Image (tube, coloured by chain):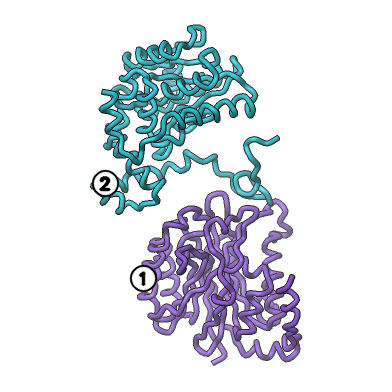
Chain colours: A cyan, B purple
Amino acid sequence: MSKHFLKSIPEELRVNVKEVVDYITLRLRHYILDYANRNKYVIGLSGGVDSSVTTYLAVKSLGPRNVHVLLLPSNSTPKQDIEDAYEVINFLNIPKENVAYIEIDEIVDEFSNMLGVKDSLGVGNIKARVRMIILHGYAHKVKGLVLGTGDKSEITIGYFTKYGDSGVDVLPIGDLYKTQVRQIAAEVRLPERIYIKPPSPALWQGQTAEGELGIDYLTLDRILYRKMELWMNDEEISKELNIPIATVEKITNMIKNSQHKRLPPEIFKIGFRSHGSDWRYPREWK
Amino acid sequence: MDKINLCLAQISTRLGDVESNAKKHIERINESNADIVCFPELSLTGYMIKDIAFEIYDRCLKAIENIRKNIKKDQLAIIGSVIKNELKTINNGAFVIKGNEILGNVKKFYLPTYGLFEEMRYFTPAFPLKDLKVFEFKGINFGVIICEDAWHYEPVEALVRMGAQVIFCLSSSPIRGVNKAKKGKLLIEDQWEALIKAHSIINGIYFVFVNRVGPEDEEFFWGGSMVSSPRGEIIARCKKYEEDVINITIDVSEVEKSRRFSSFKIHQNSFHEILSKL
């Protein structure tokens, strides 16, 4: 199955896994040890491919003892995902004392009742933000950094909750398309189900990313790759991939409409030197 | 004919929405009886377009074609746009359209790349030896420059020595220093007014400054478009912070008259020889 899956990845999306893994782990070590002056990672592990690969990279960069994993299931989390998450934990030899299991339904219900927010998207966003609060609280306790698990496909089309799963310290796989994250999972031999099952944020029951988007991730990534890396326009992409123009345009609109989620909040320029506009210093500022 | 009617179309544009911006251009042109209608810098695209700059030229061309078909025969319009050049790179520029005819385009010489500006990331600068142009319309000679070009002596000076009596300056000047405004006047507004007057006085020309107005991401363009006479008087001024249209008739015989009692008649070219060696 794994071989069959790897073969199905088109050439343009294929990455050199060893190079990419070595590079990300190098960057992670630099970021946490030299820049942030910490030595513990905190990751919300769902049992999906993104958080599993992120956890793998974290373990590879600082060893399993320095990786704290939080399972934060809700009533919409499939049982299978929790089993998958434990399989990854065992596969990566993360010690039991570094694993926390916290059900979030009670907290989510409090918010949802208090606010009168009952629709699945609204409650789903509350779930993502509750998880963010828990992860940062935990990171404070263990003096760690919260590793985000968003990939380039999701980030590009805005398929994430603002200040929820995007509320993290660093996004190690943020420049890898979903297909590439799956390729890494397959090649480093994470349990097969991790990269074969349909990706889902599981913010409500039965939610799958591909069902919501109306397009499978491989097709999405082929579109995004052409748009971002090759500067192709919608018409060219539609013709080359033989995909209806309406589908490509839908993706383009998702990218455009979610730009606000990828940028820091707008600050209206008033003075002579303003954040975001012309006050520009590096993140690593000594 | 010495008199000519000008229209300063101080508009707000939507970033990257060339089609709706073009529609606004056509409306302003059709509403106006002026001989020349001038729009701000990058008026078709918006200013802070960032990477959109690379992808928008074809849409600008279509829009220009659309505007060309909708302009009166005896009318001329100056429209800010991205322009693709023979090197297949892009310029920050403007199209000059007369009646049914595209007379030509101009390109910006000085590309600000400091503070909030990053034009050199996107645009190629114009070459003075190739790109300086003076246009003629209804017996009037004029030149077109773009924003930062007015913060240097040479573009205006060269165009005037080539015969321009009127300089149109298309601009996208963003607001800053609101916190330090004195009696409702911004420092950037004062600076522009000083530049406009100085160019007018030194060169004996009408200087027509058309500034963009409205928000774009963090930035806000303050408007306040204005016209200076050859003697350096501000003879027309648009509102600040909102769209505005001003029509003004200028008499270019004033250009000649102003030069009778001014130092314009003297031009020591050898200064430029020294400058060219520095």
Give amino acid for label 1: Asn
* Vertical order, B35 against B15 (above or below): below
- Please report the residue visible at 70 percent of the width from the left and 82 percent of the height from the top: B231
Question: Residue beneath label 1, please?
Answer: B66
Kindly report which numbered mark, 2 or 1, lies closer to the viewer in this rendering.
2
* Vertical order, B276 against B267 (above or below): above
Q: Quadrant of the N terminus of chain B?
A: bottom right
What chain does badge 2 belong to? A
Q: Quadrant of the C terminus of chain B?
A: bottom right
Residue B274 position within the rendered picture, expressed as x and y whole percent measured from the top left: 75, 76
Give amino acid for label 2: Leu
Residue B80 position within the rendered picture, expressed as x and y whole percent measured from the top left: 49, 68
Residues behind callouts 2 and 1 on a single chain: no
Task: Name the side, left or right, on which B202 lies relative to A216.
Answer: right
Disc 1 on helix, strand or loop?
Answer: helix
Q: Which residue is at the front of the view, B68 or B10?
A: B68
Residue B247 image-quadrant placement: bottom right
Question: Residue beneath label 2, please?
Answer: A241
